[in-house]
Image (cartoon, rainbow, N blue to C red):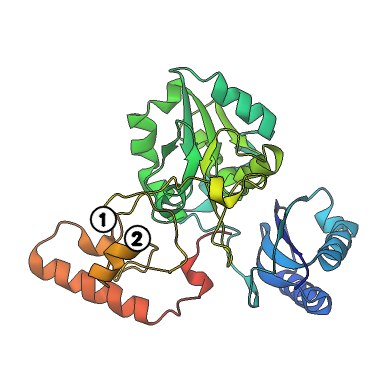
């Protein structure tokens, strides 16, 4: 198959007719033979799509011609083939699920955007008064992150409001400069605004996320490992670094041997979050638990058993490839 192009984008701008936008996206993607995921809400849009190079170029043209999407920031990369098997377009209450009353989070107060070059320089010059924070899910940061970054303890992005207070207090963020990053930038819009609402004044975010950084620093720069992506590629290394020269950053959750491959799709048996378990450990046991699984919280035996049963039953109702398992694109 011909080389494919993958496109990431998001925009926070009011969409009055969300159903009409869903129809437009569906018609356009089907006409251009584009696959992927597009999430639409009254507050904006967030998408990751892939297709033939000419098709993606035409999709970008059609999007930017519309007044609604003037100024939208597209991020693209090449792939050996289209890393999606279907087209999934949905209307949701939020572009990214945060899990709190959104009236309490002012997006206009989001962090200052830094270019990849500026973010790179900030990390190089970081001192004791600077904290680099990864606000992706834990399973994402296990296989790649920036040098010296602190990972927020998130199983899913909607955990952020719950841990924000302890994060601010433990890292003393009110007195420090915060450099925040995620995959493509959309989670940082909410994450930085949330921290600002907790009194953290100096918040800066990597514009375009890791994706944009690796397109700029194509040998990896200060990013170690691979970038987890929400498509069939699962993880992407620096474009100009040959796979055989990419050392595994992650470690098996069980034996702690070097390992960074999620392709087997091993998941927590209770909450279905991805777990990083090497092939040898998987052969020894076919059942796994994720870090900080809600079903394994320290509770009396009877309560823990009920929680396990509840999570197992809930997981059985959701297909493995359901987008409901994914918090953001």
In this orientation, which residue lies closer to the viewer: 60 or 94? Answer: 60
Q: Does residue 122 appear to the left or right of 175 in the view shown?
A: right
Q: Secondary structure at mark 2?
A: loop
Please provide percent x and percent y for residue 307: 22, 69
Above or below residue 217? Residue 291 is below
**Where's the C terminus, which quadrant?**
bottom right
State which quadrant residue 67 falls in: bottom right
User: Looking at the image, which residue is at 41% across and 42% down?
Assistant: 152
In this orientation, which residue lies closer to the viewer: 18 or 120? Answer: 120
Label 1 vs label 2: CA separation? 8 Å
In this orientation, which residue lies closer to the viewer: 17 or 10? Answer: 10
Residue behind mark 2: 278
User: Looking at the image, which residue is at 69% across and 64% down?
Assistant: 80
**Considering only order in the chain, which callout, 2 or 1, is on the residue closer to the N terminus?**
1
Q: Are marks 1 and 2 in contact (CB under 8 Å)?
A: yes
User: Looking at the image, which residue is at 82% across and 48% down?
Assistant: 71
Q: Residues within 10 Å of mark 1 (few under 14, many from 20)?
A: few
Above or below residue 195? Residue 278 is below
Please provide percent x and percent y for residue 89: 66, 73
Residue behind mark 1: 254
State which quadrant residue 305 falls in: bottom left
Please provide percent x and percent y for residue 293: 28, 60
Q: Secondary structure at mark 1?
A: loop
User: Looking at the image, which residue is at 43% across and 54% down?
Assistant: 260
Furthest-front residue in this view: 244
Decide if residue 326 is in sight here.
yes
**Where's the N terminus, which quadrant?**
bottom right
Decide if residue 114 is in sight here.
no
């Amino acid at each position: 198959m011909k080389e494919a192009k993958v496109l990431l984008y998001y925009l926070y701008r009011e969409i009055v007719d969300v159903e009409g936008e869903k129809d437009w996206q569906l018609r356009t993607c089907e006409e251009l033979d584009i696959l992927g995921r597009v999430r639409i809400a009254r507050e904006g849009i967030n998408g990751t799509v892939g297709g033939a190079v000419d098709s993606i170029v035409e999709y970008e043209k059609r999007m930017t011609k519309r007044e609604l999407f003037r100024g939208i920031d597209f991020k693209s990369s090449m792939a050996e083939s289209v890393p999606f098997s279907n087209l999934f377009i949905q209307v949701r209450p939020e572009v990214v699920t945060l899990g709190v009353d959104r009236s309490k989070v002012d997006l206009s107060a989001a962090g200052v955007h830094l270019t990849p070059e500026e973010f790179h320089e900030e990390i190089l010059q970081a001192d004791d008064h600077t904290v680099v924070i990864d606000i992706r899910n834990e399973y994402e940061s296990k296989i790649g992150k920036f040098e010296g970054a602190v990972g927020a303890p998130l199983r899913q992005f909607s955990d952020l409001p719950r841990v924000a207070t302890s994060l601010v207090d433990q890292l003393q963020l009110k007195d420090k400069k915060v450099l925040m990053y995620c995959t493509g930038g959309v989670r940082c819009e909410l994450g930085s605004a949330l921290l600002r609402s907790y009194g953290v004044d100096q918040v800066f975010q990597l514009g375009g996320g890791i994706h944009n950084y690796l397109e700029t620093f194509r040998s990896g720069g200060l990013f170690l490992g691979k970038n987890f992506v929400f498509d069939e590629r699962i993880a992407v290394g620096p474009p100009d670094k040959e796979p055989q020269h990419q050392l595994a950053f992650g470690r098996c959750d069980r034996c702690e041997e070097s390992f960074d491959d999620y392709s087997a799709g091993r998941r927590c048996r209770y909450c279905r979050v991805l777990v990083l378990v090497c092939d040898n450990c998987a052969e020894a046991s076919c059942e796994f638990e994720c870090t900080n699984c809600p079903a394994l919280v320290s509770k009396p035996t009877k309560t823990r058993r009920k929680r396990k049963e509840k999570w197992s039953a809930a997981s059985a109702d959701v297909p493995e490839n359901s987008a409901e398992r994914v918090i953001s694109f």
